[in-house]
Amino acid sequence: MAILSVKNLSISFPIDKQYYQAVDRISFSLSEGKILGIVGESGCGKSLTALSIIKLLPPKALLTADQICFNGTDILAADEHGMRELRGNDISMIFQEPMTSLNPLIKVGKQIAETVTLHQKTNNAAKEALEIMKQVGLNNVEDIYNQYPHQLSGGMRQRIMIAMAMVLKPRLLIADEPTTALDVTIQAQILDLMKQLNRKFGTAIIFISHDLGVIRQMCDEVIVMYMGNIIEVAGTEELLFNPQHPYTIGLLAAIPNPSRKKKSLFTIAGRVPGITERPAGCSFATRCGFVTEPCLRSKPPLVYQQSHGVSCFNYQDIKREIKDV
Amino acid sequence: MKREYSVYLKVGTVIITAMLIMMVVSIFFTPYDPEKMDVEHRLQGPTWKHILGTDNFGRDIFSRIMQGSQTAFTVGLVSVTIGLTIGLVIGGIAGYFGGWADNLLMRSMDAMIAFPGIIIALMFVTIWGYGITNTMIALGIMAVPRFARIARSGFLQAKELMYVKMAKSIGVSNLRIMFVHILPNIISPLIVAASLGFASAVLAEAGLSYLGLGVQPPDPSWGTMLHESQLYFNRAPLFSIAPGIMITLLVFGFNMFGDGLRDLNDPRKR
């Protein structure tokens, strides 16, 4: 059963009194207990998509959608008070920078316990905080409870943040590049931890990243976004080993590969157009090597073959062409 | 980590502490009843019995100086509290929520700053009547714009920080974010401003009382004493000089203290 379903979500920003779409009518859904990855380069709208689910978009942003439905709750219709009840309790979020995401003047244990006291009338907030701190793999939790963020390392702080988000066992966790700021060994530990929590508590995760390696390790399904559009969606293995969209193909080809030593690295030519200069047709048309006339005229719909969706008019021809080469 | 405390901070602390001790002592003990008149011994110079002499009603000046410190501290404390509280709320709303509320509130603060503070205070006192209570309220309101501006800039910066977003994402309400999560992080410039504001409140009270619009006799206040003494300056100079020095010292002390605190928070001066 889908725990989250989003239909035709658009987010636009006013620039000089005109609205520009940062996210353009995207639809996706997430099944209970699954991990959904969202990949894309900076500015493609992946963070905005995540923030719109808990309605924490910047106040200027204009959100429209046909449906954002979480576990039977209509997020679109929920007011600020209703959202506050959801946040931290049913939907949690963790952010990119563990170094700045904790309040420097509040003891970390208190910050975890706050999630509990905000949503439950209980005297056991401290106990629950200690319990989740153990669950996220911290040692000496009694000592750490009384420490301030500056006394902890980056990896420990990220664990504290995960503890804050997970203490009430939410149904959905949104992780916005949770490991980008961490070094690789800590990164592996944190990913491992999130996977564990996902299995143990059945928490569905939306995992935002631009690191395809991390995505492969974590996710059941992956959405590839480009300039506010979903251009491809598929199961992780399917997407990584049988990509259809020229952008995804380029993205995967751009991963440095040690066996191709001495060859120059592959790059996707061109640059991402700014938000005010988006093309009318396919958003990738300005950089695509296989662009044809219909691409410039209209936006290709997301066409599904079984569970593999791709938004490209020519993907079959492209596939053939690449094979021939 | 060892911190260097500046000379400013040390001097300020010493003066304020001495004044505080004097004020506390004066609550329980003064050499003479500060309001007891003794017309036979009026306008005396310093003697062993009256170390600062007596005033035009024969009251002991030293006792009145001691008693007057209570007024000075009360006025400073109450008006700073009023100014800080209102300023914090206004600056908090303006900085944290922004938009039209920010514009409306801060433009009204600008309008208040455009008038010299003493004129606003005079206006309030004229409308509501003289006396220590109204003086404190007037001085408090006068101080609001300064605190509001500092609070606004603090909230404005802090609301974009990640820990505020994190707090929002676990469902903390705006009010709680403002006062539990943000306020402790932006309090230090406000403390500095409070210290400096204390000094200007004491000075403004003395000014108003000197004009006869502040603290009313027989309540002892250094400003009132200055006012009463000006006719007798030739016969009893200490009657004027003593309260003048006390006002100067207290204002100087709080200014030093405030500057010292500011430097302590200034990373460039570490």
Image (cartoon, coloured by chain):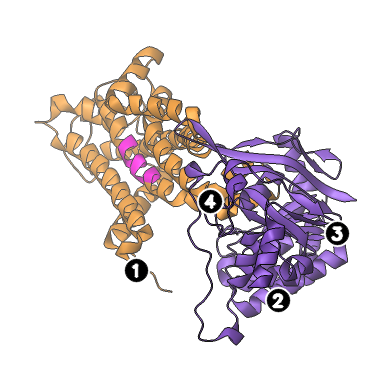
Element type where label 3 sits in the image: loop
- Please name whichever residue, B158 or A297, is drawn nearer the observer in this view of the structure: A297
- x and y percentages locating residue B240 in the rendered image: 18, 34
Task: Tell me what residue is drawn at x 45 percent, y 39 percent.
Answer: B152
- x and y percentages locating residue A125 in the rendered image: 78, 56
- x and y percentages locating residue A201 in the rendered image: 86, 62
Element type where label 1 sits in the image: loop
Residue that numbered label 3 is attached to = A33
Instruction: Give chain A's shade.
Output: purple
Residue that numbered label 1 is attached to = B4
In the rendered structure, the residue with mark 2 lies on which chain?
A: A
Element type where label 4 sits in the image: helix
Element type where label 2 sits in the image: helix
Residue contact between numbered discs 2 and 3, judged by CB atoms under 8 Å:
no
Residue that numbered label 4 is attached to = B184
- Please name whichever residue, B239 or B40, is drawn nearer the observer in this view of the structure: B239
Residue that numbered label 2 is attached to = A189
In the rendered structure, the residue with mark 1 lies on which chain?
A: B
Q: Are marks 2 and 1 on the same chain?
A: no
Tag nearer the camera, 2 or 3: 3
Dominant SS type (magenta): helix
What amino acid type should be assigned to the residue bearing mark 3?
Gly
Q: Earlier in the sequence, mark 4 or mark 1?
A: 1
What amino acid type should be assigned to the residue bearing mark 4?
Pro
In the figure, is residue A305 to the left or right of B237? right
Residue at the extreme right of the image, as rendered: A1
